[in-house]
Each structure stands twice: as structure tokens, then as C-alpha cells.
Image (spheres, rainbow, N blue to C red):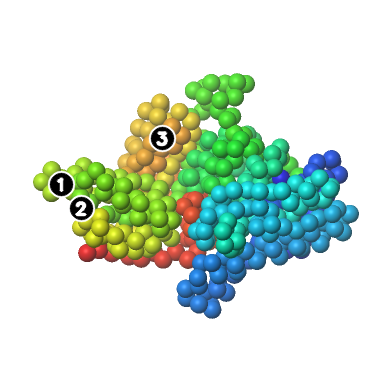
Amino acid sequence: MQKFGGSSLADPSGILRAAQRIAKTRENGYQVVAVVSAMGDTTDELYDLAADVSPRPRPSDLDALLSTGELVSSALLAIALADLGQAPVTFTGSMAGLITDDVHGKAQITDVRPDRIRTCLARGEVPIVAGFQGRTKKGKKITTLGRGGSDLTAVALAAALGAGICEIYTDVDGVYTADPRIVPRARKIGVLSSEVMLEFAASGCKVLHLRCVEYARRFGIPIHVRSSFVPELGTLILPGLDRHPFRKPVKEQPVVTGVGGVNSAAKVIVIGVPDTPDSMARLFQVLSHSGVNVQTIVQNAADSGSRRSDVALIVPATQAAPALAVLDAAQGTIGFQGLQHDGEVGRVSITGVGMRSSPDVFCTFLWTLSEAGIDLDLVEISETYVAAITRSERLEDAERAVRLAFGVARAAEETARSRSRPDKHLDVDGDVRWGHGLRGLTASPASRGR
Ligand code: ASP
Ligand code: MG
């Protein structure tokens, strides 16, 4: 399986480079299935086009539009590959057998039936699949999997076809210990477990889509993230590596392997939730039906007098408005007293292994932030990460302090005042990514609800 990202296919020379890569792999005796993203910023441009035509396009129409970007790439790649003597066959997501639910814009894969791809492979042909899209089971309507979703297409097909490896060709040459744009001396990691990669992805490393890493881990698919511009090996992400017998026991490994920061979250506070056994369940039912991905939940102890408590939710910033809207509509049935939107918040985290069993790591993290004068909103700890929520504007300071404290970046002083390059990715499906200033963010001022 070889997946080529948008930046690898941004122009004709990128298409030719990808074609040569596929042809070379074929010449080495391997079968190849290629999955492609839309060229360069095509998906963003399609979004903008839709916005120019209507302020509120229907999600199903938007999917029909967005899915075309990948079709262009797959056809062009086929044209280039045919010239190299191969027999490419183009596939839409639907033809490739990617069946999804009907949540347009962020559909989940429910089934993969790649029969036509198998037939194609058996004939010695090269299937080229448009990533990021599928179709609903009943209505056969086109769906998209959420921004960055073609990684997921590749891993899902790799799993269904029993591929030996899923290579993700991109514009970086691997996974780094920290964002190399912010930390000049961040190191490239050679091999890493899916478990740790999952935490990296969740704490802001955007090299791989979070859902793609989850999927790969669940189905045991090894991923190789590598550059489409240079031939060198990138980073191998192996499922179950932490349990592999040839590895030293986990405790002997350096505990902290990365520091991340994400600035694209928002806090929603549900005030005065009745202290009944079902109110939390009702609350999350409403949210889950609306497709909002809650990243963190904190519930205050109920006030013994009022028998009510406040529940704070951290959601991707782009989902704050929909979360507020559905909660507002359900206020009557759930019976809470009000809603508060705390605008943008930042999440600084360290990732590694054995966090829970290393209280000193946790302590150092908290002391470091307190010495840097960072106010913490809430703190999370798991076996593989420790994270704190803080104000957006303090995130960079927090990250820098934590990196210094854990020696993840000896060169923190060189930190190039973070040329905060706008991120082309919209974060609609809760996978948080490196980088600040996500497009399309509506940073509404803190607004007190009723
Ligand atoms: N073209 C889609 C996007 O930009 C999917 C992808 O790149 O993976 O989100
Ligand atoms: Mg991508």
C-alpha cells in the first residue's frame, strides 16, 4: 500500500515522482495499491468555492464536491503510470468498496469490500484509489472521512487486503520528537510503537491522522511514514512494539519521548447539571449524536445544597459552536442551568511510556509550568501522556518550558519565535494537529450563556 499526500502531488512533477515510485516498487516484484489525496490545496479551494456559492451548503453536496479533488489526482497518476509501462486502474472510494455511515463530512468506515481491487491486483494491474471518500451503504451517497482522511483510506484498505505495509508518502521525512518547525534540533524517530504514535497524534503531531493510527493499531498494520522527495527511510510505526520480546523492558526506556502543543481546542462549560444518575449520559448522548468529539471531560463535585455540578468539556475549536447549539437545544430535557464558552484553550502535553508509574515526571511537569507562571485549567494523566489545559496565549511559553525541563529540545532558545504557519487542515474530526491558526476558526469571545 502506498499513499501519496496532497503535498506530494501538488504539481505535475509530484505526480510523475509518485508514478516513478510506484513503478519502481512494481519492478522490485511487489504488488502495489496506491491511495491519493487531492493535489496541494485543492480541498481548501473546493471548500472556498462552495462558500462562495452558498453560506450553508448541504453536507451531502459538499461531500460530492470535496471528493472530486482526489479523483483528479488518481486520474493524473494513472496517466503518468501508464506511460511507465504499468497498467493502472482508477477507483473512486465507492468502487474500492469503502462503505461508511451517513455522517457527511466526517463519515466513519463501517465496512471495506475491496473485491474489485483484488481482481485488479490478480491481473497484474495497479489500482489507484481516490482517498478520503466512501459511500453510504443504503443510499450509495458519496461521503468524505474528515480532513486528512486519505491516510485512513490507505490503512483501511491495507487491513482489508492484508497488505504487508502501508507506506505514507508525505512532505516530511518522518516523525520527530517535537515539531521541527518550532524546535530546530528535534530528532527523527526511526521506529516507534503505534501506541506512542497514537499519543503523538492525539497531542498534536499532524504527520498522521489520529483515526488512521488507531485503525492501524487495531488491525496490526505497520506504517512507514516517509518523504516522497528523498529515498531515505522515514519512521516505522509498528503495532504492539511495546510488547515485543526483543525490546528492553519498557521501564528502561527514556520515559518522555515528546512534547506537544495544540491550540485549537475550546472549552464549553455546562453549568448546574442536575446530580442524577442519568444526566451525564443524556448530555453525552446529545453530543455524540451531533458528531461532536469531546476530548476531555471534567465534572466538579456536586454542591450538596443545590445537588448540581458543572461539567467542563474540551472540544476541537471548530466544534465549539455545534456543541453549544445542540446543548442549548437540549437544555430543557437535561435540565442544566446554563452554558459558558471559554473560547480557545491550549493543551500542552508530554508523551512517553509508563507515565502513571513515574510520579516524578508528573511532578516535574507541574512544577515547570508553575515556575513559568502558567495557569492550569485542568490536568490529565494516562499511561502514555500527561497533559494540561491552559490559555491559548500561554501555550508557546508552556511548551518551551516543558521542552527545556525534559531536555526534549536543548535548542529551545533558538526557537524561531514560532513562525506560526497557517495550517491548511481544518480540524473537523477531533484529531488535533501541530500548528496554530487553523483556517476557518471562529474564535468567538467568551460568551456567557443564559
Ligand atoms: N484532501 C483531503 C484533505 O485535504 C484528504 C487528505 O488530504 O487526506 O483533507
Ligand atoms: Mg494529509
Q: Give the Cα separation between the discs numbered 2 and 1.
A: 8 Å
Give yes or no for contact between labels 3 and 2 (Cβ–Cβ under 8 Å). no
The N terminus - image quarter:
top right
Specify the farthest residue to the bottom.
Answer: 53
Query: Is the residue at mark 2 in contact range of ligand 1, meaning its CB lies under 8 Å from it?
Result: no
Q: Nearer the viewer, residue 196 or 337?
A: 337
Q: Give how far across and how far down residue 102 sits, in percent.
A: 52, 59
Residue under numbered circle 3: 382
Residue at image point 32% right, 41% down: 370
Quadrant in the picture for residue 243: top right
CA distance for labels 1 and 3: 30 Å
- Which numbered disc, 1 or 3, marks the residue that appears first in the sequence? 1
In this figure, which residue is indicated by the disc labeled 1? 307
In the displayed orientation, state which residue is furthest to the right.
Answer: 85
* Residue position for label 2: 272
- Mark 1 touches mark 3? (CB < 8 Å): no
